[in-house]
Amino acid sequence: MALRTLDSLGSLAGKRVIVRVDFNVPLKDGVITDDGRVRAALPTIDHLIGQGARVIACSHLGRPDGAPDPKYSLEPVAQRLSELLGKPVAFAGDTVGESAEQVVAALADGDVAVIENLRFNPGETAKDAGERRAFAEQLASLGDALVSDGFGVVHRKQASVYDLAELLPSAAGYLIEKEVEVLDRLTENPERPYAVVLGGSKVSDKLGVIEHLLPRADKILVGGGMLFTFLAALGHKVGKSLLEADQLETVKGYIATAQERGVELVLPVDAVMASGFAADADHVVAAADALEDTAFGAEGMGLDIGPKSAELFADAIRSSRTVFWNGPMGVFEMPAFAAGTRAVAQALTEVDGLSVVGGGDSAAAVRQLGFDDAAFGHISTGGGASLEFLEGKKLPGLEVLGWA
Ligand code: ADP
Ligand code: MG
Protein backbone atom coordinates (compact mmCIF):
# COMPACT_ATOMS: atom_id res chain seq x y z
CA MET A 1 0.00 0.00 0.00
CA ALA A 2 1.15 3.50 -0.69
CA LEU A 3 2.26 6.10 1.78
CA ARG A 4 -0.38 8.76 2.51
CA THR A 5 1.15 12.05 1.40
CA LEU A 6 0.38 15.66 2.29
CA ASP A 7 -2.28 16.24 -0.36
CA SER A 8 -4.36 13.40 1.13
CA LEU A 9 -5.12 15.72 4.06
CA GLY A 10 -6.94 18.20 1.85
CA SER A 11 -6.90 21.89 2.67
CA LEU A 12 -5.16 22.67 5.94
CA ALA A 13 -5.98 26.38 5.99
CA GLY A 14 -6.86 27.47 9.50
CA LYS A 15 -6.25 23.96 10.89
CA ARG A 16 -3.95 23.22 13.80
CA VAL A 17 -1.39 20.90 12.27
CA ILE A 18 1.07 19.00 14.43
CA VAL A 19 4.29 18.26 12.56
CA ARG A 20 6.38 15.49 14.07
CA VAL A 21 9.89 16.38 12.93
CA ASP A 22 13.36 15.19 13.82
CA PHE A 23 15.04 18.17 15.47
CA ASN A 24 17.51 15.92 17.27
CA VAL A 25 20.48 18.17 16.45
CA PRO A 26 23.95 17.98 17.99
CA LEU A 27 24.35 20.65 20.69
CA LYS A 28 27.50 21.90 22.37
CA ASP A 29 27.04 24.20 25.37
CA GLY A 30 23.55 25.07 24.18
CA VAL A 31 24.72 25.92 20.65
CA ILE A 32 23.63 23.88 17.61
CA THR A 33 26.73 22.54 15.86
CA ASP A 34 24.92 21.16 12.79
CA ASP A 35 21.44 22.39 11.84
CA GLY A 36 21.05 19.92 8.95
CA ARG A 37 18.01 18.30 10.56
CA VAL A 38 16.25 21.62 11.07
CA ARG A 39 16.87 22.49 7.42
CA ALA A 40 15.58 19.09 6.35
CA ALA A 41 12.21 19.90 7.95
CA LEU A 42 11.81 23.24 6.16
CA PRO A 43 10.07 22.11 2.94
CA THR A 44 7.15 20.63 4.90
CA ILE A 45 6.91 23.51 7.38
CA ASP A 46 7.11 26.09 4.57
CA HIS A 47 4.36 24.28 2.70
CA LEU A 48 2.09 24.28 5.77
CA ILE A 49 2.73 27.97 6.40
CA GLY A 50 1.89 28.62 2.75
CA GLN A 51 -1.40 26.77 3.19
CA GLY A 52 -2.31 28.96 6.13
CA ALA A 53 -2.11 26.15 8.68
CA ARG A 54 -1.32 26.79 12.34
CA VAL A 55 1.88 24.81 12.67
CA ILE A 56 2.85 23.02 15.88
CA ALA A 57 6.28 21.42 15.49
CA CYS A 58 7.29 18.70 17.94
CA SER A 59 10.40 16.56 18.28
CA HIS A 60 12.63 14.70 20.66
CA LEU A 61 16.15 15.85 21.42
CA GLY A 62 18.74 13.58 22.99
CA ARG A 63 17.80 11.04 25.61
CA PRO A 64 16.36 12.81 28.64
CA ASP A 65 14.96 10.38 31.17
CA GLY A 66 11.26 11.01 30.67
CA ALA A 67 11.52 14.23 32.69
CA PRO A 68 12.38 17.85 31.91
CA ASP A 69 16.13 18.46 31.62
CA PRO A 70 17.25 21.94 30.51
CA LYS A 71 20.25 20.39 28.73
CA TYR A 72 17.84 18.92 26.19
CA SER A 73 15.49 21.86 25.73
CA LEU A 74 14.30 22.53 22.20
CA GLU A 75 14.37 26.28 22.79
CA PRO A 76 17.63 26.90 20.87
CA VAL A 77 16.17 24.85 18.01
CA ALA A 78 13.02 27.00 17.98
CA GLN A 79 15.28 30.04 17.67
CA ARG A 80 17.22 28.48 14.82
CA LEU A 81 13.97 27.55 13.07
CA SER A 82 12.82 31.16 13.40
CA GLU A 83 16.06 32.37 11.75
CA LEU A 84 15.72 29.87 8.93
CA LEU A 85 12.05 30.68 8.31
CA GLY A 86 12.63 34.40 8.66
CA LYS A 87 9.64 34.77 10.96
CA PRO A 88 8.85 34.48 14.66
CA VAL A 89 8.42 31.01 16.14
CA ALA A 90 6.58 30.68 19.45
CA PHE A 91 7.98 28.30 22.04
CA ALA A 92 6.04 26.36 24.65
CA GLY A 93 7.98 25.46 27.80
CA ASP A 94 6.08 22.21 28.15
CA THR A 95 4.88 19.58 25.70
CA VAL A 96 1.23 18.97 26.54
CA GLY A 97 0.58 21.21 29.54
CA GLU A 98 -0.76 24.70 30.07
CA SER A 99 2.04 26.46 28.23
CA ALA A 100 1.54 24.29 25.14
CA GLU A 101 -2.23 24.89 25.19
CA GLN A 102 -1.79 28.65 25.49
CA VAL A 103 0.84 28.85 22.76
CA VAL A 104 -1.34 26.82 20.39
CA ALA A 105 -4.45 28.85 21.21
CA ALA A 106 -2.56 32.05 20.36
CA LEU A 107 -1.51 30.87 16.88
CA ALA A 108 -2.96 32.67 13.87
CA ASP A 109 -3.13 31.12 10.39
CA GLY A 110 0.39 30.66 9.03
CA ASP A 111 2.03 30.94 12.46
CA VAL A 112 4.53 28.43 13.81
CA ALA A 113 5.17 27.13 17.32
CA VAL A 114 7.59 24.59 18.75
CA ILE A 115 6.57 22.65 21.84
CA GLU A 116 9.12 21.33 24.33
CA ASN A 117 10.99 18.02 23.94
CA LEU A 118 8.59 15.09 23.61
CA ARG A 119 10.88 12.88 25.66
CA PHE A 120 10.44 15.08 28.74
CA ASN A 121 7.31 12.91 29.10
CA PRO A 122 7.69 9.23 29.98
CA GLY A 123 4.68 8.39 27.78
CA GLU A 124 6.58 9.20 24.57
CA THR A 125 8.85 6.16 24.73
CA ALA A 126 6.83 4.01 27.16
CA LYS A 127 6.89 0.27 26.49
CA ASP A 128 3.39 0.08 27.95
CA ALA A 129 0.93 0.68 25.13
CA GLY A 130 -1.68 2.24 27.42
CA GLU A 131 0.76 4.77 28.84
CA ARG A 132 1.93 5.64 25.36
CA ARG A 133 -1.60 6.00 24.08
CA ALA A 134 -2.57 8.27 27.00
CA PHE A 135 0.27 10.66 26.16
CA ALA A 136 -0.62 10.53 22.45
CA GLU A 137 -4.20 11.51 23.34
CA GLN A 138 -2.92 14.58 25.17
CA LEU A 139 -0.84 15.50 22.14
CA ALA A 140 -3.76 14.88 19.81
CA SER A 141 -5.88 17.40 21.70
CA LEU A 142 -3.49 20.14 20.53
CA GLY A 143 -4.11 19.57 16.83
CA ASP A 144 -6.56 18.75 14.06
CA ALA A 145 -4.13 16.78 11.89
CA LEU A 146 -0.67 15.22 12.03
CA VAL A 147 2.05 15.50 9.45
CA SER A 148 4.72 12.95 10.25
CA ASP A 149 8.12 13.99 8.97
CA GLY A 150 10.71 12.74 11.45
CA PHE A 151 12.23 10.04 9.29
CA GLY A 152 14.98 9.36 11.86
CA VAL A 153 12.43 7.90 14.29
CA VAL A 154 10.03 5.94 12.05
CA HIS A 155 11.56 2.67 13.23
CA ARG A 156 10.36 3.44 16.76
CA LYS A 157 6.90 2.59 18.04
CA GLN A 158 6.59 5.79 20.08
CA ALA A 159 3.61 7.95 21.02
CA SER A 160 4.23 10.84 18.59
CA VAL A 161 5.45 8.54 15.82
CA TYR A 162 2.89 5.77 15.95
CA ASP A 163 -0.10 6.31 18.27
CA LEU A 164 -0.65 9.95 17.36
CA ALA A 165 -0.84 9.01 13.67
CA GLU A 166 -3.72 6.67 14.53
CA LEU A 167 -5.55 9.28 16.57
CA LEU A 168 -5.52 12.18 14.07
CA PRO A 169 -5.92 12.38 10.30
CA SER A 170 -2.28 11.83 9.33
CA ALA A 171 0.08 11.81 6.38
CA ALA A 172 3.79 11.79 5.61
CA GLY A 173 5.61 15.08 5.07
CA TYR A 174 8.00 15.74 2.19
CA LEU A 175 11.08 14.44 4.00
CA ILE A 176 9.59 11.03 4.77
CA GLU A 177 8.12 10.87 1.28
CA LYS A 178 11.54 11.50 -0.29
CA GLU A 179 13.34 9.06 2.02
CA VAL A 180 10.88 6.28 1.30
CA GLU A 181 10.96 6.89 -2.43
CA VAL A 182 14.77 6.73 -2.54
CA LEU A 183 15.24 3.82 -0.14
CA ASP A 184 12.56 1.87 -1.95
CA ARG A 185 14.50 2.30 -5.18
CA LEU A 186 17.50 0.74 -3.46
CA THR A 187 15.53 -2.38 -2.60
CA GLU A 188 13.07 -2.77 -5.51
CA ASN A 189 14.20 -2.66 -9.13
CA PRO A 190 17.33 -0.53 -8.84
CA GLU A 191 18.78 0.62 -12.12
CA ARG A 192 21.77 -1.61 -12.88
CA PRO A 193 24.63 -2.02 -12.30
CA TYR A 194 23.87 -1.55 -8.60
CA ALA A 195 26.78 -1.19 -6.18
CA VAL A 196 26.52 -1.31 -2.39
CA VAL A 197 29.49 0.15 -0.55
CA LEU A 198 29.79 -0.81 3.11
CA GLY A 199 32.22 0.35 5.75
CA GLY A 200 32.10 1.71 9.27
CA SER A 201 33.32 0.05 12.34
CA LYS A 202 31.59 -3.28 12.77
CA VAL A 203 30.24 -6.06 10.55
CA SER A 204 27.89 -7.01 13.35
CA ASP A 205 26.08 -3.63 12.99
CA LYS A 206 25.44 -4.27 9.30
CA LEU A 207 24.54 -7.95 9.09
CA GLY A 208 20.87 -7.28 8.29
CA VAL A 209 21.73 -4.83 5.52
CA ILE A 210 24.29 -7.17 3.97
CA GLU A 211 21.82 -10.05 4.04
CA HIS A 212 19.02 -8.05 2.47
CA LEU A 213 21.09 -6.24 -0.17
CA LEU A 214 23.55 -8.97 -1.15
CA PRO A 215 21.02 -10.76 -3.37
CA ARG A 216 19.87 -7.44 -4.88
CA ALA A 217 23.23 -5.84 -5.70
CA ASP A 218 25.60 -6.49 -8.59
CA LYS A 219 28.66 -5.48 -6.59
CA ILE A 220 29.38 -5.26 -2.89
CA LEU A 221 32.40 -3.22 -1.83
CA VAL A 222 33.71 -3.63 1.69
CA GLY A 223 35.91 -1.11 3.50
CA GLY A 224 36.11 0.40 6.99
CA GLY A 225 36.81 -1.60 10.10
CA MET A 226 34.69 -4.51 8.85
CA LEU A 227 37.03 -5.23 5.95
CA PHE A 228 39.48 -6.92 8.33
CA THR A 229 36.95 -9.57 9.29
CA PHE A 230 36.52 -10.26 5.55
CA LEU A 231 40.29 -10.46 5.02
CA ALA A 232 40.64 -12.73 8.05
CA ALA A 233 37.88 -14.94 6.63
CA LEU A 234 40.05 -15.33 3.53
CA GLY A 235 42.92 -16.47 5.76
CA HIS A 236 44.91 -13.23 5.93
CA LYS A 237 46.53 -11.90 9.07
CA VAL A 238 45.29 -8.49 10.15
CA GLY A 239 47.51 -7.53 13.10
CA LYS A 240 45.69 -5.41 15.66
CA SER A 241 43.04 -4.20 13.21
CA LEU A 242 39.36 -4.40 14.16
CA LEU A 243 38.45 -8.06 13.91
CA GLU A 244 35.20 -9.65 14.97
CA ALA A 245 36.25 -13.24 15.46
CA ASP A 246 32.68 -14.28 16.29
CA GLN A 247 31.54 -13.12 12.83
CA LEU A 248 34.13 -15.06 10.82
CA GLU A 249 31.75 -17.90 9.93
CA THR A 250 28.98 -15.46 8.98
CA VAL A 251 31.35 -13.53 6.76
CA LYS A 252 32.57 -16.74 5.12
CA GLY A 253 28.90 -17.41 4.39
CA TYR A 254 28.55 -14.01 2.68
CA ILE A 255 31.63 -14.67 0.57
CA ALA A 256 30.16 -18.00 -0.53
CA THR A 257 26.71 -16.55 -1.21
CA ALA A 258 28.19 -13.75 -3.31
CA GLN A 259 30.06 -16.32 -5.37
CA GLU A 260 26.99 -18.53 -5.86
CA ARG A 261 24.82 -15.63 -6.93
CA GLY A 262 27.42 -14.04 -9.18
CA VAL A 263 27.59 -10.90 -7.05
CA GLU A 264 30.97 -9.27 -7.38
CA LEU A 265 32.54 -8.89 -3.94
CA VAL A 266 35.12 -6.11 -4.15
CA LEU A 267 37.57 -6.28 -1.26
CA PRO A 268 40.50 -3.91 -0.68
CA VAL A 269 43.83 -4.91 -2.18
CA ASP A 270 45.74 -2.68 0.22
CA ALA A 271 45.25 -0.89 3.52
CA VAL A 272 46.88 1.86 5.55
CA MET A 273 48.55 0.22 8.54
CA ALA A 274 49.31 2.42 11.55
CA SER A 275 51.43 1.99 14.68
CA GLY A 276 48.35 2.66 16.82
CA PHE A 277 44.95 4.32 17.00
CA ALA A 278 46.04 7.97 16.99
CA ALA A 279 45.88 10.92 14.62
CA ASP A 280 49.67 11.23 14.59
CA ALA A 281 50.45 7.50 14.46
CA ASP A 282 53.16 6.36 12.03
CA HIS A 283 51.59 4.65 9.04
CA VAL A 284 52.42 2.85 5.80
CA VAL A 285 50.50 1.20 2.98
CA ALA A 286 50.53 -2.61 2.97
CA ALA A 287 49.10 -5.19 0.57
CA ALA A 288 45.90 -6.82 1.81
CA ASP A 289 47.54 -10.25 1.96
CA ALA A 290 50.62 -8.96 3.78
CA LEU A 291 49.26 -6.56 6.40
CA GLU A 292 51.71 -7.77 9.02
CA ASP A 293 54.74 -7.36 6.74
CA THR A 294 55.39 -3.78 7.82
CA ALA A 295 57.70 -2.28 10.44
CA PHE A 296 54.78 -2.62 12.91
CA GLY A 297 54.46 -6.36 12.31
CA ALA A 298 51.54 -7.94 14.19
CA GLU A 299 51.13 -4.70 16.18
CA GLY A 300 49.99 -2.80 13.08
CA MET A 301 46.42 -1.52 12.94
CA GLY A 302 44.54 -0.94 9.68
CA LEU A 303 42.88 2.47 9.76
CA ASP A 304 41.97 3.09 6.10
CA ILE A 305 41.78 1.37 2.75
CA GLY A 306 44.92 1.91 0.67
CA PRO A 307 45.32 4.07 -2.46
CA LYS A 308 45.00 1.13 -4.91
CA SER A 309 41.79 0.05 -3.22
CA ALA A 310 40.47 3.61 -3.28
CA GLU A 311 41.01 3.65 -7.04
CA LEU A 312 39.46 0.22 -7.46
CA PHE A 313 36.42 1.27 -5.42
CA ALA A 314 36.07 4.59 -7.25
CA ASP A 315 36.04 2.77 -10.61
CA ALA A 316 33.44 0.27 -9.43
CA ILE A 317 31.28 3.12 -8.11
CA ARG A 318 31.56 5.37 -11.16
CA SER A 319 30.63 2.52 -13.49
CA SER A 320 27.38 1.85 -11.60
CA ARG A 321 23.95 3.43 -12.16
CA THR A 322 22.75 2.99 -8.59
CA VAL A 323 25.05 3.27 -5.58
CA PHE A 324 24.26 3.00 -1.91
CA TRP A 325 27.05 3.83 0.51
CA ASN A 326 26.99 3.30 4.24
CA GLY A 327 29.97 3.47 6.56
CA PRO A 328 33.25 5.40 6.29
CA MET A 329 36.14 3.57 4.60
CA GLY A 330 38.53 4.44 7.42
CA VAL A 331 38.93 6.52 10.55
CA PHE A 332 38.05 9.69 8.64
CA GLU A 333 37.96 11.72 11.87
CA MET A 334 41.78 11.65 11.66
CA PRO A 335 43.01 13.39 8.48
CA ALA A 336 45.77 10.83 7.89
CA PHE A 337 43.11 8.11 7.51
CA ALA A 338 40.44 9.99 5.57
CA ALA A 339 41.70 9.46 2.00
CA GLY A 340 39.69 6.31 1.32
CA THR A 341 36.46 7.90 2.52
CA ARG A 342 37.18 11.02 0.47
CA ALA A 343 37.82 8.95 -2.69
CA VAL A 344 34.58 7.01 -2.27
CA ALA A 345 32.58 10.19 -1.59
CA GLN A 346 34.12 11.84 -4.64
CA ALA A 347 33.25 8.85 -6.82
CA LEU A 348 29.65 8.94 -5.60
CA THR A 349 29.37 12.54 -6.76
CA GLU A 350 30.37 11.34 -10.25
CA VAL A 351 27.75 8.59 -10.57
CA ASP A 352 25.56 8.83 -13.64
CA GLY A 353 22.42 7.69 -11.85
CA LEU A 354 21.26 7.52 -8.25
CA SER A 355 23.85 7.93 -5.47
CA VAL A 356 22.73 7.62 -1.86
CA VAL A 357 24.68 8.16 1.35
CA GLY A 358 23.19 6.53 4.47
CA GLY A 359 24.34 6.41 8.08
CA GLY A 360 24.96 9.13 10.65
CA ASP A 361 28.75 8.99 10.55
CA SER A 362 28.86 8.69 6.76
CA ALA A 363 26.71 11.81 6.38
CA ALA A 364 28.92 13.61 8.91
CA ALA A 365 32.00 12.42 7.00
CA VAL A 366 30.94 13.86 3.64
CA ARG A 367 30.16 17.21 5.26
CA GLN A 368 33.38 17.24 7.29
CA LEU A 369 35.35 16.48 4.12
CA GLY A 370 33.81 19.53 2.48
CA PHE A 371 31.37 17.91 0.06
CA ASP A 372 28.16 19.72 -0.76
CA ASP A 373 24.98 17.78 0.09
CA ALA A 374 23.65 18.61 -3.37
CA ALA A 375 26.52 16.68 -5.01
CA PHE A 376 24.81 13.44 -4.00
CA GLY A 377 21.49 12.07 -5.18
CA HIS A 378 20.34 11.79 -1.59
CA ILE A 379 21.80 11.86 1.90
CA SER A 380 19.55 9.90 4.17
CA THR A 381 18.73 11.67 7.43
CA GLY A 382 17.87 8.53 9.35
CA GLY A 383 20.75 6.39 10.57
CA GLY A 384 18.97 3.48 12.24
CA ALA A 385 15.73 4.05 10.33
CA SER A 386 17.44 3.92 6.92
CA LEU A 387 19.33 0.78 7.84
CA GLU A 388 16.21 -0.96 9.12
CA PHE A 389 14.35 0.00 5.96
CA LEU A 390 17.18 -1.50 3.91
CA GLU A 391 17.10 -4.62 6.07
CA GLY A 392 13.56 -5.11 4.82
CA LYS A 393 12.05 -4.58 8.28
CA LYS A 394 8.56 -3.21 8.82
CA LEU A 395 8.81 0.27 10.33
CA PRO A 396 5.87 1.15 12.63
CA GLY A 397 6.05 4.89 11.85
CA LEU A 398 5.64 4.16 8.12
CA GLU A 399 3.09 1.37 8.38
CA VAL A 400 0.80 3.69 10.33
CA LEU A 401 0.98 6.10 7.36
CA GLY A 402 -0.21 3.42 4.97
CA TRP A 403 3.16 2.09 3.78
CA ALA A 404 3.31 -1.66 3.39
P1 ADP B 1 27.49 4.99 9.99
O1 ADP B 1 27.12 5.81 11.21
O2 ADP B 1 27.68 5.82 8.78
O3 ADP B 1 26.56 3.84 9.79
P2 ADP B 1 29.37 3.42 11.51
O4 ADP B 1 28.77 3.96 12.77
O5 ADP B 1 29.16 2.01 11.18
O6 ADP B 1 28.94 4.36 10.27
O7 ADP B 1 30.95 3.60 11.57
C1 ADP B 1 31.60 4.83 11.68
C2 ADP B 1 32.92 4.71 12.41
O8 ADP B 1 33.71 3.67 11.86
C3 ADP B 1 33.73 5.96 12.31
O9 ADP B 1 33.78 6.59 13.57
C4 ADP B 1 35.12 5.48 11.85
O10 ADP B 1 36.18 6.07 12.56
C5 ADP B 1 35.05 4.00 12.13
N1 ADP B 1 35.99 3.25 11.31
C6 ADP B 1 36.08 3.21 9.98
N2 ADP B 1 37.13 2.46 9.58
C7 ADP B 1 37.71 2.00 10.71
C8 ADP B 1 38.86 1.18 10.95
N3 ADP B 1 39.59 0.67 9.96
N4 ADP B 1 39.15 0.92 12.25
C9 ADP B 1 38.42 1.41 13.25
N5 ADP B 1 37.33 2.20 13.08
C10 ADP B 1 37.00 2.49 11.82
MG1 MG C 1 27.36 5.44 13.31
Image: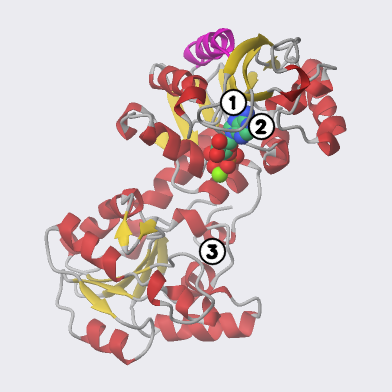
Name the amino acid type tagged 1: Val
Q: 10 Å neighbourhood of mark 3: few (<14), some, or many (≥20)?
A: many
The image's mark for residue 213 is 2
Quadrant where ligand 1 appears? top right
- What secondary structure is the magenta-colored segment mainly? helix
Of callouts 3 and 2, the N-terminal one? 2
Cα gap from disc 2 to disc 1, whole angstroms? 8 Å
Quadrant hosting residue 133: bottom right
Cα gap from disc 3 to disc 2, whole angstroms? 25 Å
Whether tag 2 and tag 1 are in contact, CB under 8 A, the answer is yes
Report the residue marked by disc 3: 400
Magenta-tinted stretch: 306-320
Q: 10 Å neighbourhood of mark 2: few (<14), some, or many (≥20)?
A: many
Mark 2: secondary structure = helix
Mark 1: secondary structure = strand
Mark 3: secondary structure = loop
Residue closer to the observer: 169 or 179: 179
Query: Residue 340's x, y, as percent?
Result: 51, 20
333 on left or right of 389? left
Of callouts 1 and 3, the N-terminal one? 1
Q: Is residue 308 highlighted in magenta? A: yes
